[in-house]
Amino acid sequence: MKIGFIGLGNVGGKLAGNLLANGADLTVRDLDNAAAASFLAKGADWADTPAQMVEAVDLVITCLPSPAESAAVMEGPDGLLHALGPGKIWAEMSTTDADEMIRLAALVEATGAQAIECPVSGGCHRAATGNISIFAGGERETFEAMLPVLTILGRRVLHTGPIGTASKLKVMTNYLATTHLVALAEALTTMAAAGVDLATTYEAIRISSGNSFVHETESQVILNGSRDINFTMDLVLKDIGLFQTIAEDHAVPLELSPLLVRLFEEANVAYGAREHSPNIIRRYEEPSGLDIRAPGFPAEMIDDEPAVRGAEVMPRRG
């Protein structure tokens, strides 16, 4: 299968790199030509436009920062929709709005092509090794056609149901991750203020019922001081805003979610939209006059799990 990949940013670049490392026949595209240089040097081809890419491949994957950018790639003057047709697959790996995903998928299917959404979860460091998790929404036939590619890209692949379900689940998981990030920022700052050693605090959380994936990753770069988890304030706000919209659309009276949206709206103004997301701890660190750092923690996360071929995860039934 010939594969095209559009969007070589923090996540997309690592996913595309994993495909190339596994011998995929790959064509790439990004608005930043420099982002493609390392791929071209390793044998990937380049497409001047999204439409040109479709003509050269069987499967086009998009991994972009926002729904608006995905729509532009699909519907622009040289967009994918101008060239998609029978025998082609479009896979959206961006974190996007479910209704927008449904709208674009309908346009794709009207051309005779197939559409599937495949957002990922687990951090950029796992995207690079193929140990990330993937939610896949779409027709079962399309999912099965994509599965050989998805099991290269991810360790655990979950077919979530029809188009739109994967996007909803992805922003839900990002809401949960954000909830714990803020809780960890409060917990670490409070322990530091109380005179408890921060390295000891880290281990106490890690071996306890308070542990989480977010703690084992983001707390480490917080304590290092780099705060670099390859995710930024504006992307957090986009994702938790999408989750809040789902709740509002279904008249669910949430309490934590609106608070998180407000916190990150304020953080985007105070620290900048492109600030590292773990620096939400500055909201507590700076007023308290504390430095929430400790020696011995890494500046970035490296996935040290063995890279293995992925497999489908089956939901429990009955």
Image (cartoon, grey):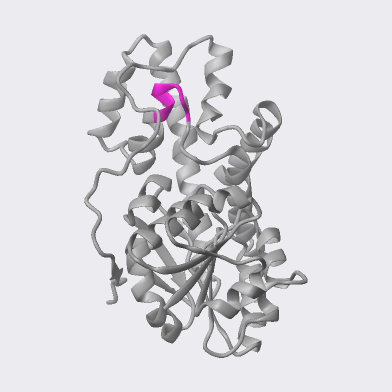
Q: Report how many numbered discs are placed on residues in the image.
A: 0
Residue under the image location 31 percent in, 37 percent down: 211
Residue under the image location 49 percent in, 53 percent down: 13
- In the image, farthest residue toward the right: 77
Q: Position of residue 107 (x, y in %)?
A: 67, 81
- 115 sits to left or right of 128: right
State yes or no: residue 222 in magenta: yes
For the record, the magenta segment spans: 221-227
State yes or no: residue 103 in magenta: no
Residue under the image location 55 percent in, 33 percent down: 276
Residue under the image location 48 percent in, 62 percent down: 119
Q: Position of residue 313 (x, y in %)?
A: 30, 69
Q: Position of residue 113 (x, y in %)?
A: 57, 85
Q: Quadrant of the N terminus?
A: bottom left
Q: Quadrant of residue 298?
A: top left
- 295 sits to left or right of 249: left
Q: Quadrant of residue 196?
A: top left
Of residues 14 and 204, the one nearer the viewer is: 14
Residue 252 appearing in the image: no
Of residues 30 and 271, the one nearer the viewer is: 30
Of residues 55 and 179, the one nearer the viewer is: 55
Residue 299 sits above or below residue 200 on the image: below
Residue 6 appearing in the image: yes
Q: Quadrant of the C terminus?
A: bottom left
- 51 sits to left or right of 285: right
Of residues 253 and 7, the one nearer the viewer is: 7
Residue 84 sits above or below residue 96 on the image: below
